[in-house]
């Protein structure tokens, strides 16, 4: 599903260049749930941003679905995100003025889906994330956990093959964090999605089939999931 | 305090660096407002000052002036006045206009002053550069000799001994330059743009033998000028005035009062709209920096200092805007002075082109300081509200996370109620009459109207749309529109201010448009109904509005016979127009053959029938009075009016009041026979000519031109103008008058547009994260562009809606209150649909243009950086 070859990313910070990713090579198969852990600034989020096409690598190659993305234009990336990728953010990033159901419908509407189909899919997702009773509420009227449920539903609305979750529990307490991770795991497994989870929480990382540890922009080690950890 | 100033400068500079584009837009908006205000004020003052300088320079040591009406004075008054105790000297003056001929084409007009040169060569403040020859004295008094001002001589490349062709009245005469006229001091003055000749020569040349235009008197310094003035009055006929020279300036100032006031008020519109812009910028700054404010408060900055911090930032914008606006205003003033001089000459009194005296280096500093003051004051007024808000913010609230707009709890309902009260106030203020001839309450009503609508803007922004589930939208554009409207409606405070600024600009544009179009329509109807003569024979410079004195504005009475003898001409009227004073008002006395006019043409009388009124006035020796004059003097049909004529004081019955739009000074109409018996004036201003059926207008016109230019009294083709040409000319003068209005309006609208750009940039900056989220979940850059454009369209639509309402009411105020109270004209209101649609399309287009750049910018922002935004 995702192949990374010699991926590098450097940022300019003032006068100096900072290396965020250094020669990252990785292969992730269809349906895998892969977690990335590491301290702040180790390059986890940068890695996700590059895979989502939100940022461009300095060098190296990203292959999605067997297709190299090196020469993709902005419009082609937009199409890939509409069809293939769903993203969950740490800060939820819901559109403030829209209700829960409208936020979930947004990716479908952005690609021009028909109203009836959109409504059906939104209803289904609201039920699955347990937010049907809060469908007409705006983000400001929802708790952090509820907002993240809506954000997950939004990320899955267009049935993406690849779900990218960037610190989805970072803004939540441990109880809600565990709920959210369970939800992601449950939805991804039932939908057959490939999931890339970035987190600094080792507990949250246990939801993955395996965990990559990162430091200073490099992948250090791959650890398989411990038995019984899925129940977290 | 000095430490605080250091802190202030430090913080201000960091703010300016933080938002350079918004800072630039705000400064440009302020500077545009300042430039309009500075330019109009400078031009207004300059035109009047040039007139004043001209009067005072020529007056020299004169302490009193004796003047008659347009028909001049009998020169015998000189002897009577000289005998009055306290009079040192009484010098006769003739002042007339001539036009320099360049080949067969008339060129620039100049004033020629006839003075007693033998007596006054060294007393008036000029010096003459004349070669010393044996015939020097004879040259001086020769009717063909002329002393030409140095500036004109240089401009026209003429030197002593050169010939110059001048059009004097209807005749073309050749003069010889016998000397160059210079100002005694180093400064340039009115003398340098004039010509002088000896008084006796001037009487011959201008056909004024036995007459003078004015008598300039020097009184003894030991005696009170007022006492001498009273003594002089006793030896003069009643219609002759005695006044100080400066009085002429104040008369003109008074005459132009309403016109200048309206222009000044219109020039303030840009400042008003600029104030909204500043408010918006500062409100955003306060919102943006609320955490910063919390930190300042937490580390010990007092509430007043927080307010001062923001006020100083606004003042800084005002300062820079003031400097730039003054520079632009000075550049604009150059053009405005020409336009204004022309308009004032067209409508009121020949003032000549302003001498740009205010635009000399020594005055520039003053203008710039004035511009800076205006900029600072306006900006600080605009910033009072946001600064007050900033100072009241508690540190805990400021440091807490959350939406600023929500924390502000803008009371849109309370504001809307205030708006309704203000609108009610506007209605009440429009009822009472003017105060001291100025529609002060009308202006107050206008302010209340605009302020009221501005207060209603937030509720319109937040309550305009009807929410519905976005999923029902079929097209993607519907989704983007929904999000855009939702966002705009969620920020009624900031967006309300933007919409208000736009609404004010648009309302004034629409209000003035309806007023001008209605006025034009009224004038067109009036012209069509009353200007019925097929041809008008007039002095060649009649339409140029530059003539001073009788000669340039009159034709010999003998032409009546020449014209009447043409077989194609059915009737010829003799129209005479002179200016006199009635109850301190400068009034045009128009005389014509009323019975003939009743038969061939008409006046738009307020009540009754035109023909009956005209015949009756001719029969009983009555007057018809223009509506403007009737209002000013408080007279009506059936009243008696006292007029001081050269034959003494006479009381006339007023037979009818008629609508007239040719002058705002008012008009008296009487039969020509009555006028001649009282004024002893045989001259004619124009001859309206009526042709027989079947006569060919062009042929008669050509024949008249040839015949009159070869007649005994002729010499140069007079202006023979057809009915169609005359109507066109009248409307051209009208359009020229309002050109200035359009310029000032355009400036206000541009500032309002900057307001929209400013708001959208603010919105885009604030929503970078939202846009990036949309991009991350599959939105394209085109969709982001659409989103911002829809927001612009929404704000524009609310602004246009309010602007239409405001414009409609404003046009009513302008037509029924302000114009009526300022000038006294009745204007028939029309709705110029086509022009209104054009204006609205222009506004909509401007909104889209204002939205396009922020939209493009938003669509190009990097996604990752936007997602990182807190």
Image: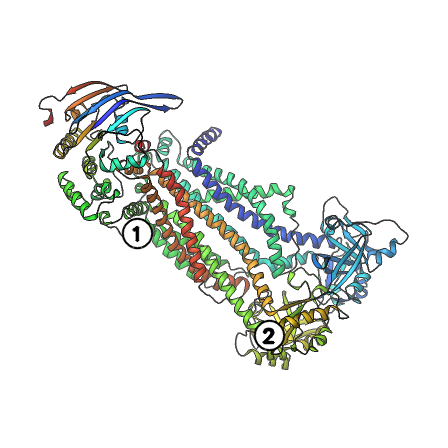
Q: Mark 2 lies on which chain?
A: B
Nearest the viewer among B354 and B400 is B354
Residue B204 appears anywhere in the view:
yes
List x then y, in percent, for residue B76: 80, 67
CA neighbours of label 1 inside 10 A, class few (<14), some (14 to 19), many (20+):
some
Say what secondary structure mark 2 lies in: strand
Q: In which quarter of the image is residue B573?
A: bottom right
List x then y, in percent, for residue B423: 39, 58
Q: Residue at x 25, y 50 (%)?
A: B467
Q: Distance between the residues labelled 1 and 2?
A: 57 Å
- In the current view of this chain or complex, which residue is farthest to the left? A228
Q: Is A72 on the left-hand or right-hand side of B704? A: left
Residue A93 appears anywhere in the view:
no
List x then y, in percent, for residue B849: 42, 46
Residue, disc 1: B463
Depicted B728 relative to depicted A104: above or below: below
For residue B677, the mark is: none
Depicted A130 relative to depicted B14: above or below: below
Q: Is B678 on the left-hand or right-hand side of B400? A: right
* Both marks 1 and 2 on one chain: yes
Q: Is B436 on the left-hand or right-hand side of A97? A: right
Q: Residue at x 40, y 32 (%)?
A: B301
CA neighbours of label 2 inside 10 A, class few (<14), some (14 to 19), many (20+):
many
Residue, disc 2: B624
Q: Which colour scheme is used?
A: rainbow
Q: Which chain carries label 1?
A: B
**Which of pointers 1 and 2 lies earlier in the amino acid sequence?**
1
Say what secondary structure mark 1 lies in: helix
Image quadrant where one finds the C terminus of chain B:
top left
């Amino acid at each position: 599903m995702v192949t990374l070859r010699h991926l590098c990313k450097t940022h300019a910070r003032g006068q100096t260049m900072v290396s965020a990713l250094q020669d990252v090579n990785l292969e992730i198969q269809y349906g895998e749930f892969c977690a990335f852990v590491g301290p702040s600034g180790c390059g986890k989020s940068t890695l996700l941003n590059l895979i989502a096409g939100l940022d461009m690598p300095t060098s190296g190659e990203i292959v999605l679905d067997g297709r190299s993305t090196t020469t993709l234009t902005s419009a082609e990336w937009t199409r890939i995100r509409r069809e293939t990728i769903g993203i969950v953010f740490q800060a939820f990033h819901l559109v403030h003025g829209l209700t829960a159901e409208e936020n979930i419908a947004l990716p479908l509407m952005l690609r021009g889906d028909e109203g009836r189909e959109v409504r059906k899919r939104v209803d289904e997702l609201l039920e699955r994330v347990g937010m049907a009773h809060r469908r007409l509420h705006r983000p400001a009227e929802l708790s952090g956990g509820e907002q993240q449920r809506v954000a997950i539903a939004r990320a899955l609305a267009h049935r993406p093959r690849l779900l990218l979750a960037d610190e989805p529990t970072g803004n939540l307490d441990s109880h809600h964090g565990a709920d959210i991770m369970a939800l992601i795991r449950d939805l991804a497994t039932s939908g057959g999605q490939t999931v890339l989870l970035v987190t600094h929480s080792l507990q949250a990382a246990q939801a993955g089939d395996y965990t990559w540890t990162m430091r200073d922009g490099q992948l250090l080690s791959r650890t398989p999931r411990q038995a019984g950890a899925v129940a977290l | 305090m000095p430490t605080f100033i250091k802190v202030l400068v430090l913080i201000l500079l960091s703010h300016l660096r933080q938002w350079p584009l918004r800072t630039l837009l705000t400064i440009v908006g302020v500077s545009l407002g300042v430039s309009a205000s500075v330019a109009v004020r400078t031009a207004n003052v300059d035109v009047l000052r040039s007139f004043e300088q001209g009067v005072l320079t020529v007056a020299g040591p004169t302490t009193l002036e004796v003047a008659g009406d347009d028909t001049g004075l009998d020169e015998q008054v000189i002897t009577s006045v000289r005998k009055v105790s306290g009079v040192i000297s009484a010098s006769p003056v003739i002042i007339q206009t001539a036009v320099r001929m360049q080949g067969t084409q008339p060129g620039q007009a100049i004033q020629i002053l006839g003075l007693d040169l033998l007596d006054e060569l060294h007393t008036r403040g000029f010096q003459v550069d004349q070669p010393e020859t044996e015939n020097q004295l004879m040259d001086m008094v020769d009717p063909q000799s002329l002393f030409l001002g140095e500036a004109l001589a240089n401009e026209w490349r003429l030197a002593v001994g050169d010939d110059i062709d001048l059009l004097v009245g209807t005749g073309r005469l050749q003069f010889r330059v016998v000397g160059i006229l210079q100002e005694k001091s180093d400064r340039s003055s009115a003398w340098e743009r004039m010509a002088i000749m000896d008084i006796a020569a001037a009487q011959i040349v201008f056909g004024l033998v036995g007459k003078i235009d004015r008598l300039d008197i020097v009184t003894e310094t030991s005696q009170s000028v007022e006492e001498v003035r009273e003594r002089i009055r006793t030896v003069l006929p009643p219609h002759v005035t005695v006044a100080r020279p400066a009085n002429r300036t104040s008369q003109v100032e008074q005459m132009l009062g309403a016109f200048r006031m309206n222009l000044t008020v219109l020039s303030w519109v840009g400042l008003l709209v600029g104030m909204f812009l500043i408010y918006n910028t500062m409100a955003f700054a306060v919102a943006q920096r609320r955490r910063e404010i919390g930190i300042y408060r937490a580390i010990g900055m007092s509430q007043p200092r927080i307010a001062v911090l923001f006020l100083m930032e606004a003042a800084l914008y005002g300062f820079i805007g003031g400097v730039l606006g003054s520079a632009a205003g000075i550049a604009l003033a150059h053009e405005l002075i020409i336009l204004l001089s022309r308009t004032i000459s067209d409508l009121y009194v020949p003032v000549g082109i302003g001498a740009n005296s205010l635009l000399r280096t020594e005055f520039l500093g003053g203008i710039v300081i004035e511009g800076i003051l205006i900029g600072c004051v306006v900006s600080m007024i605009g910033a009072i509200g946001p600064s007050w808000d900033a100072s009241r913010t508690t540190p805990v609230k400021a440091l807490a996370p959350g939406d600023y707009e929500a924390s502000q709890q803008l009371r849109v309902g309370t504001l809307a109620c205030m708006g309704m009260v203000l609108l009610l106030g506007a209605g009440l203020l429009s009822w009472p009459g003017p105060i001291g001839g100025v529609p002060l309450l009308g202006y107050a009503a206008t302010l209340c109207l605009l302020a009221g609508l501005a207060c209603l803007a937030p509720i319109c922004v937040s309550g305009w749309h009807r929410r519905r589930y976005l999923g029902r939208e079929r097209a993607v554009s519907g989704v983007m529109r929904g999000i855009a409207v939702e966002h705009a409606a969620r920020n009624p405070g900031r967006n309300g201010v933007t919409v208000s600024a736009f609404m004010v600009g648009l309302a004034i544009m629409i209000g003035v448009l309806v007023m001008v179009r209605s006025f034009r329509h009224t004038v067109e109807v009036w012209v069509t109904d009353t200007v019925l003569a097929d041809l008008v024979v007039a002095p060649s410079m009649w339409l140029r509005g530059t003539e001073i004195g009788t000669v340039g504005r009159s034709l010999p009475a003998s032409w009546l016979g020449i014209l009447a003898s043409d077989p194609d001409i059915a009737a010829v009227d003799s129209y005479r127009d002179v200016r006199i004073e009635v109850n301190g008002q400068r009034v045009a006395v128009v005389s014509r053959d009323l019975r003939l006019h009743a038969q061939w043409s008409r006046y738009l009388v307020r009540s009754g029938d035109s023909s009956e009124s005209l015949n009756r006035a001719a029969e009983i020796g009555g007057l018809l009075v223009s509506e403007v004059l009737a209002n000013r003097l408080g007279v009506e049909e059936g009243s008696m009016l006292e007029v001081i004529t050269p034959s003494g004081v006479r009381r006339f019955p007023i037979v009818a009041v008629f609508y007239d739009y040719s002058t705002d000074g008012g008009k008296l109409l009487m039969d020509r026979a009555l006028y001649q018996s009282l004024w002893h004036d045989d001259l004619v201003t124009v001859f309206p000519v009526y042709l027989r059926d079947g006569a060919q207008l062009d042929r008669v016109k050509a024949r008249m031109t040839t015949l009159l230019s070869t007649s005994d009294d002729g010499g140069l083709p007079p202006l023979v103008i057809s009915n169609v040409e005359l109507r066109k000319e009248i409307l051209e003068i009208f359009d020229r008058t309002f050109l200035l209005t359009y310029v000032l309006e355009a400036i206000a609208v541009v500032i309002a547009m900057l307001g929209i750009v400013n708001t959208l940039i603010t919105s885009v900056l604030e929503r970078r994260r939202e846009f990036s989220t949309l991009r991350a979940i599959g939105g394209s850059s085109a969709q982001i562009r659409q989103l911002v454009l829809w927001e612009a369209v929404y704000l524009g639509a609310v602004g246009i809606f309010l602007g239409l309402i405001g414009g409609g009411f404003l046009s009513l105020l302008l037509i029924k209150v302000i114009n009526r109270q300022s000038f006294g004209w009745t204007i028939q209101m029309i709705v110029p649909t086509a022009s209104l649609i054009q204006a609205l399309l222009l506004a909509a287009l401007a909104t889209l243009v204002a939205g396009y750049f922020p939209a493009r910018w938003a669509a190009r922002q990097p996604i990752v950086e936007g997602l990182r935004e807190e």
